[in-house]
Image: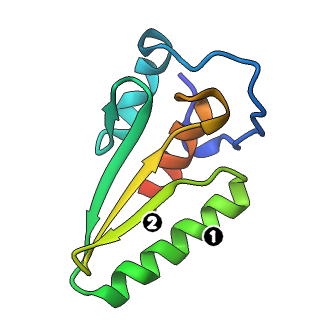
């Protein structure tokens, strides 16, 4: 099994199929806190003690996303909660990039 933390996201311009559950199940143990939504999206919510911590976290996620060239949808709500959604938009589903980025975010 490959370690997601040691991988690098690769550009995806489409033209490939999204991963099927049977293909991405092997990665789920490495991103246990994330929920798979309709086999097309990874989602996780983080809770902080205040708005400032939420923003600091979002900025750290942004730095990782820029470094990897793969960007999550980020929702700040309730002033102390951040929900991240990962999907490879070019293929309208999950790719290895989503699992790599989730794994790296979990290291924060």
Q: Position of residue 37 (x, y in %)?
A: 33, 32
Picture quadrant of residue 51: bottom left
Give me the disc on residue 76: none
Q: Which residue is mark 1?
A: 63
Q: Report whether 40 appears left or right of 91.
A: left
Residue at image coords 36%, 45%? 43
Picture quadrant of residue 108: bottom left
Tag 1 and tag 2, C-beta contact below 8 Å: no
Q: Position of residue 84 (x, y in %)?
A: 40, 55
- Residue 15 higher or lower than 86, as above or below: above
Which tag is nearer the camera, tag 1 or tag 2?
A: 1
- Residue 74 higher or lower than 58, as above or below: above
Are there few (<14), some (14-19), or many (20+) residues within 10 Å of tag 2?
few
Q: Report whether 11 appears left or right of 87.
A: right
Q: Report whether 47 appears left or right of 67.
A: left
Q: Which residue is mark 2?
A: 108
Q: Position of residue 18 (x, y in %)?
A: 58, 20
């Amino acid at each position: 099994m490959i370690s997601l933390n040691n991988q690098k996201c690769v550009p995806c311009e489409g033209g490939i199929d999204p991963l099927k559950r049977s293909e991405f199940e092997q990665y789920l143990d490495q991103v246990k806190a994330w929920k798979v939504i309709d086999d097309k999206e990874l989602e996780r919510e983080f809770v902080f003690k205040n708005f400032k911590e939420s923003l600091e976290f979002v900025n750290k996620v942004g730095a990782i996303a820029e470094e990897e060239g793969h960007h999550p949808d980020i929702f700040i709500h309730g002033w102390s909660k951040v929900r991240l959604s990962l999907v490879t938009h070019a293929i309208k589903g999950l790719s290895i990039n989503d699992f790599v980025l989730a794994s790296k975010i979990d290291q924060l």
